[in-house]
Image: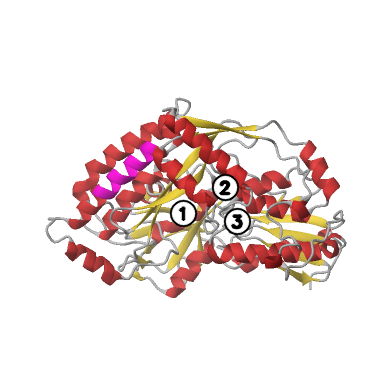
Amino acid sequence: MLLTRSIFTPIFFVILLIFSQAAAANPWQDLARADLAFAHEQIEMNHPGAIDPDDAHVRQWLDDGYAHALAQLPNVSSLSDYRLILNAFFAGFRDPHVGISLGVSQPDLQWPQFVVAGRYGKVMVVGSSMTTPAVGAELVACDGVPVDQLLTKRVFAFGANPAVEASFDREVRQLFFYSRNSFFARLQTCRFTNKGAAFDVELEWKDLTPQAWRMFENADGEVFGSPSLSEPMDGIYWLAVPSFSADGNNKMAMENLFRKINQMQNTMAESKALVIDVRGNRGGTDALVERLTYLLFDKDTLRKAGESKQAPIEIDWRASAGNLADAQTWLDPANSRYHANQALIRGVIDGLKSAFDQKRDYFRQTVEAETFSEDPSTLPYWYHQGDPSTKQCPAFVPAVPIKAKIFVLMDGACVSACLDFLDNLKLFAGIKYLGLATDADTQYLDTRSMELPSQLGKISFPMKVYRTRARKPGQVYEPDVKFTGLQRDQKDLRDWALGVVSKSVGGALQ
C-alpha cells in the first residue's frame, strides 16, 4: 500500500481491465499470480544475486517470498490486495534497486487527518488538521498493539528497510493512509504521549485530500524542482542537484546547469561559500556524477584527489540474454544510459556477449580507480567549439582553485548515484556536510525496468554486483552538523542550512 507520486492511470482503465478479464472468476487474483510469476522469473534469470554463492539472501527470499505470496493469493480480491501482495514480495529483498512501481491509483484511500513520520527512532505527529493529536505528539500504540509491531505488520512488510534511519523516517508516513484490503483492518483507537501526558484518540477517517498530500510530502521534506544555480545571499552560491537522472527534461536541465557552472566557476571559487544541495536526489547515472565533479574543481585539485583513490573496482555483470539485449540498446543516443565514451559501453556489451556465449554466469569488469587526470575540456561529454552543431555553446573556461567554503546539504533520499557523488566529494578536504543521514544501497546496482504482464506498472532489478568497493553495502553518510528539528519541510531545511553557512562564513542571515 506504499504511496507514490507516479502518474496515475485513470480508474476507468482499471475498470475496463477488470471487465476484459470477465472469463476469470477473480481477475485481481489472476493478475497478481501472473505478475508475481513474471517478477520471480525475471529476477531469477537476470539478478546477479540470484545465483551468487556469496549472498544467500537474494536466492532465499526469491523462493521463500514467492512461496509466501502464492500462499496469500486466495486473499486477493481487490486492487488494494493486488498492490499489497506485489509490494510485499519486493519488500523482502530490502534493496532500493529491486522494486515495483505501480501506475494505478487507489480510489478509496483515506487518512485520519494527521500524518506521522519517523524521528530518531520514534513515530511522531508532524502534521495535523485537528487539535488532537497535536504536532509533536508521539505514537505509542493502536488498538492495543505497540507501535513497533504496527510498523512491522503494516509498513515494513510492504517496503523500506527499518534498519536504515532514513528509510525508517520516510516510510513511517505510510502507517495512517488506508485503503480497504484483506490483510489488515482499519485502525480505530490510538494512544499518544505529549509533554509527559498519555491520551487516546478515536480515529476519524476521511477521504484523501490535497491537504493530506501536502502534509505527507512535507513530513519528510520531499524535494521537487529542477537543477539550478543561484545566489540566495550575497557571496553564497546554492547549487541544487535533486537528481542525476539522464531521462527526459532532467538531462537537458543538467546540461544547461553544467554550462552555467563552467561559466561561473571562477566567480564561485572567489565567493564566501558554495552549498551543494543534493536533497531529494535518488540517483541516476554516474556519467552525470563524473561531469559535475570535473566542473567544480581545478585540474591540480582533481589530480590530488585522484591520488587518494583506492584499488580498481571489480564488478560482475550477470550474463543473461535479457541483460545483454538491454545493454545493446545503450548505444542509441536517445537511451538515457548512452555515454559519449562508446568504448566503455561496447566493453560491457562485448563482455556480456562473450560470457553468455560461453555459458558463464558473470562477465568480470575491472574499473580502474578514477584519477581525475583528464582535461575536462577534452572529455567526450563536453561541447567542442570546432563542432558546427555546438557553435552556440560557450567556450570552456578552465576552473580555478576554490577558495570558497564548500558545504553539502543532504537528506535521507540520497542513494545510488547520489552516494557515488558523495564518494567523490569525500576525496576533497575541507567540505562540511549538513542536514540528515543518507539512505543506503547494497552491492547490487545498474538497474533495468520491465513492464508487468498486467500493464499496471513496472519492475526493476540490478544487473551487476560490486565485488570490491570502498563504501560497504548498507553504509550511510552522516552529516557533520545534523538537523534536529521536528519539521523537515523543504523550506525549513534550506533556511536552517543557510543559517549554518552564514554563521560559518561570518555573514549575517538576510
Q: Name the residue under label 3.
A: 244
Occupied quadrant, residue 383: bottom right
Mark 3 vs mark 1: give the one in front. Answer: 3
Residue 165 percent across, percent down from the top left = 55, 47
Cα separation, mark 1 vs mark 2, equals 21 Å
Cα separation, mark 3 vs mark 2, equals 10 Å
Q: In this view, does 71 lie to the left or right of 217?
A: left
Residue 449 visible: yes
Residue 237 to residue 361: above or below: below
Residue at left offset 21%, top offset 50%: 75
Cα separation, mark 3 vs mark 1, equals 26 Å
Occupied quadrant, residue 270: bottom right
Look at the image and say whether residue 140 sits in the magenta stretch.
Answer: no
**Which quadrant is home to the N terminus?**
bottom left
Q: As shown in the figure, which amino acid type bears the numbered disc 1? A: Val
Q: As shown in the figure, which amino acid type bears the numbered disc 3? A: Phe
Look at the image and say whether residue 38 sits in the magenta stretch.
Answer: yes
Residue at left offset 74%, top offset 66%: 260
Mark 3 vs mark 2: give the one in front. Answer: 3
Question: Magenta residues?
Answer: 34-45
Along the viewing direction, whichever of 348 and 398 lies nearer the viewer? 348
* SS type, badge 3: loop
Mark linked to residue 172? 1
Of the numbered discs 3 and 1, the one sitting upstream in the chain is 1
Q: Main secondary structure of the magenta part?
A: helix
Mark 1 vs mark 2: give the one in front. Answer: 2
Q: As shown in the figure, which amino acid type bears the numbered disc 2? A: Ser
